[in-house]
Image (spheres, helix red, strand yellow):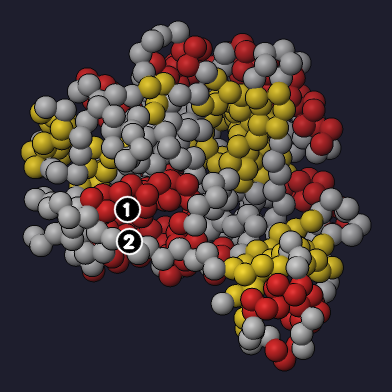
Amino acid sequence: MWIRINNINLDIDEDLSNLNKIASKKLKIKDSDIKELRVVKESIDARKKNNIKFNYAIDVKCDNAERIVKKINSNDVKIEEKVYAPEFTFGTEKLQKRPIIIGMGPAGLFAGLIMAQKGYKPIIFERGEDVDARTASVDNFWNQGKLNTESNVQFGEGGAGTFSDGKLTTRIKDIRCDYVLRELVNHGAPEEILYMAKPHIGTDILKVVVKNIRKRIIELGGEVKFNSKLEDIIVKNNEVQEVVVNGQKIPCDVLILAIGHSARDTYEMLFRRGIFMSPKPFAIGFRVEHKQDLINENQYGSYKNHPRLKTAEYKLTHTAKCTGRGVYSFCMCPGGHVVASASEENTVVVNGMSNYKRNNINANSAIVASVRPEDFGSDSPIAGIEFQRKYEKLAFELGGKNYNAPVQLVEDFLNDRKSKKLKGIEPSYTPGVEFSDLRNCMPNYVVNSIKEAMPVFNRRIHGFAEGGAIFTGVETRTSAPVRINRNEEDVSISTKGLYPAGEGAGYAGGIISAAVDGLKVSETIMKKYNIPNY
């Protein structure tokens, strides 16, 4: 039994060994009475730039834990017993066919892992390539401008999150998050992600982790098939009967649909097949780049080069009075670069990426404004897809029709003038960039919302909208434009046997929440169906 102690502060230069002494003092016991201590949360309090502190939550193990906690009677001291162990009663219905999972992003990957661990031997179909071949295809696009529409930043082993910062922060409060983090560590992620307040893995390490999870699924009897595209779903009497993958019909009892937020052709196929979907809001905008040193100095002041401090991040929000829309920073990538993320020909899409060390010279994040289904101008549930395409195609044209991205200095954007030269910040986007007027590839209400927000952000982070800060367009894939609606049992409300999951289904927003959703859906299936004997 562990005792959780929250809100322990250490000065920036204070040794971690002092945690034991502070814990024993808070618990009113001897240092030697603590048999084990582990850090479960570490965060930085940089509100006072001249007095930066680290805040910790720790677990300690000692005798008479319940009596000690009762005697202390503090909100910061409690018994910690919540550890997710994926144990549950299996169902009684029989599966005639192996579970099929479509997509190998976080939702599909963790659905496959937990089902393989429990003996269900799932088959995972991924339209893209394995992570090594996928990396080669992505590099070819970035360096040569040759897009592989089936294997790219959006599609392939690990999903879109593989080519990102590998952020593991989430707003959901679900005990399954612990399982996800521990399995990531078990398969090669740094152990610090278990306790850092803002954990991340980075693209370089995440590639290794997803490969190791795939190998484990196969070791446990699962199958993983790459370059295997879902082309159709055969439904009879409102129930899934078969899937069509690469022209081959495969009988199916249960189908986990974890397609990711960019599988537009799959959404369109589902719509034709009568799978119930609804439009959902998302956000669009641009990537902004600064020198990382500017962000470090704003966040840490004179401590910006302190060895204990990691590369600084930021999070900014504003509600635009002119439009009533939320404007916010999204997917901030410290020490990263802006990446070409198109998945369809003749479009330009940008995203951000960092490696584990976050040691590139520039920082970047998306600055986006919310868009709503009523903005799409159609009652169709997939109208948001065409909305995204429109602005991606405009960005392609502005960039020169060669996958170069349109760019504009922030100060020129705010003053409605096309930029003519850079001012100290080199755009990190490849294949290349073209000076443009970004008003020409974004709706007026988004432009006006961002124009109102940037001076506000500049007051919070000095220099944010000044100097050489540069916008690169366009960011359109912040989340799925569609929700594949499901009921309380995680089944499609229109189609039995179909289990929409993850970000592509509209039920998650990031690596951790998508992985957790994959676990939830898998648990639902396993609680209904017994361990099969194929």
Asked where in the image residue 6 lies, by quadrant, the reply is bottom right
Residue 203 is situated, as x and y percent measured from the top left of the image, at 49, 54
- Mark 1: which amino acid? Glu
Are discs 1 and 2 less than 8 Å apart at CB? yes
Q: Nearer the viewer, residue 312 or 221?
A: 221
Q: Residue at x 80, y 38 (%)?
A: 461
Looking at the image, which residue sits at the far top?
A: 377
Q: Residue at x 32, y 40 (%)?
A: 490
Q: Residue at x 63, y 61 (%)?
A: 196
Q: Is residue 178 above or below residue 32?
A: above
Please identify the quadrant where the N terminus is shown: bottom right
Residue 240 is situated, as x and y percent measured from the top left of the image, at 15, 35
- Mark 2: which amino acid? Phe
| Dot 2: element | loop
Residue with the mark numbered 2: 88
Asked where in the image residue 346 lies, by quadrant, the reply is top left
Q: Nearer the viewer, residue 36 or 269?
A: 36
Question: Could one spot residue 471 in this view of the protein?
Answer: no
Residue with the mark numbered 1: 523
| Dot 1: element | helix
Question: Could one spot residue 303 in this view of the protein?
Answer: yes
> Could you tell whether 431 is left or right of 102 in the image?
right
Q: Which disc is residue 330 wearing?
A: none
Residue 421 is situated, as x and y percent measured from the top left of the image, at 70, 27
Q: Nearer the viewer, mark 1 or mark 2?
A: 2
What distance separates the C-alpha of mark 1 from that of mark 2? 8 Å
Please identify the quadrant where the C terminus is shown: bottom left
Crowding at dot 2, Cα within 10 Å, few <14 / some 14-19 / many 20+, comes out as: few
> Could you tell whether 176 is left or right of 93 in the image?
right
- Looking at the rendered structure, the number of numbered marks drawn on it comes to 2
Residue 399 is situated, as x and y percent measured from the top left of the image, at 52, 23
